[in-house]
Image: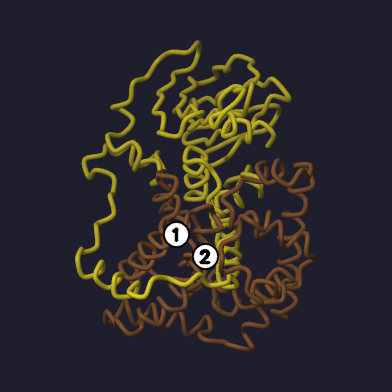
Amino acid sequence: MIRHHPSLDLLADYASGALPEPLALLIACHASLCAECRGQLAALDKLGGAILDELSPAPLGDDALEDALRRIDRSAPAPLPEAAAALDARSRAILPAPLRRYLPQGMGALRWRWRGPLREARFDLPSRGFRVSLFRLKAGAAAPRHGHAGHEFTLVLEGGFRDAGRQYNRGDFALADSSRAHVQIADEEGCLCLVVLDAPVRLSGVLGAIANRFLRF
Amino acid sequence: MPAAALPAAVSSPRYAAWRRGGLSAQRRTRDAIVEGEELAGLIGAIAMRGDRDAFARLFRHFAPRLKAYAMRCGADAASAEEVAQEAMVQVWRRAATFEPARADAQSWIFAIARNKRIDLLRRERRPEIEPEAGSQDERPEARIEAARQTDALGRALAALPADQASMLRKAYLEDKSHSAIAAETGLPLGTVKSRVRLGLARLRLLMAGWDA
């Protein structure tokens, strides 16, 4: 049973399309496991539909409909890219479907590096300003106490951990920010998490705008 | 929002009505072209028999709105038209995946257009939800009459206090996170968040009232 969910702000930003890709991936993975948040997101899409419907129409070119029909005739439906059939059973069981699309070779193909008691496999997406990783914590191990310049968004994929007296299991979502240092202690079976870190403060420019907008979440 | 940033079409009386929050109800009485259930039927006709007339009607209803949506999200007229076109092509291709019991036509097409604009305008991929086998879905009875719910939602939106409604529209139409809206409007982030939250909570209450 999932106990910890993303905030309504994050769900609303996913529904409107405002979230950058790494965070949208995290929300899509959580919602793929969480019926409650799927229900919330369906309601938020309904609101999007209602807002779309009341928009003042902007006329299209005269031959727009014919053009659309030509496009339809020109190309057959492209099959949706599904994760490779060869994906190993463990990756298939543990990685939520949206994540499998980013890791078609499975977890075994990732490059795992030691970071203290943690193992990290980075697979950054094109969006700049974010660090996207799988983290593995051994049974009973504690992630060193750490603070963040920005935010740490975590989704538990396997096993579980405790942080500040709260238990997190598969599907649970956690958000840590710079307001408090924290330490995560893995359960007996260890823990595997999808983690997105937003960048430390950047000072100016487009990148800064992207990073900074999450500093205040 | 500065008037100069608005697309040409929005200076119409309809836009003025929309700004006052009264358009939904007004449009539905004056030119209720196609209602939610009929729209869903058109998508069904495309799915079942590749009905091009049904597509044409759907196109006339939605494509201009999709173009307006993309322009509000910051696209120029040509890119916005491309988003509208590609979204409608996607509507044709994915018609068979539309489930009227789960979603209404407007929100289904909104989701397609949102993903298209992220794809075409922002050049990012859009991670989509794919429910895991065994993850219990919402109660079936909660899904009935999706089309009627959306009509009710339109009325609820029109009845919201102006500051909450405008915040919700901003959030959906301008590709901005809550924080970006706060920076732009000069309102504290807490105020933006609470208006969005209040708006959403109030919509829920209003809709519950109509269901009863």
- Which of the two labelled residues, at mark 2 and mark 1, occupies the earlier sequence position? 2
Mark count:
2
Q: Which chain is brown?
A: B
Of residue B95 and residue B158, the one placed in the foreground of this image is B158
- Percent position of residue A187, x then y: 55, 26
Of residue A13 and residue A159, the one placed in the foreground of this image is A13
In screen coordinates, is A40 left or right of B202? left
Please rate how many residues cluster around mark 1, counting C-alpha atoms within 10 Å: few if below 14, some from 14 to 19, many from 20.
many
Of residue B152 and residue B55, the one placed in the foreground of this image is B55
Q: Tag 2's secondary structure?
A: helix
Q: Which residue is mark 2?
A: B68
Please rate how many residues cluster around mark 2, counting C-alpha atoms within 10 Å: few if below 14, some from 14 to 19, many from 20.
many
- Name the residue: 56% across, 66% down: B8
- CA–CA distance between discs 2 and 1? 7 Å
- Percent position of residue A76, x then y: 20, 64
Q: Amino acid at mark 2?
A: Ala
Quarter of the figure with residue A206: top right
- Name the residue: 63% across, 74% down: B12
Q: Check whether the beta carbons of the residues at disc 2 and disc 1 lie within 8 A of each other.
A: yes
Q: Amino acid at mark 1?
A: Ala
* Chain letter behind tag 1: B
Q: Which mark is residue B80?
A: 1
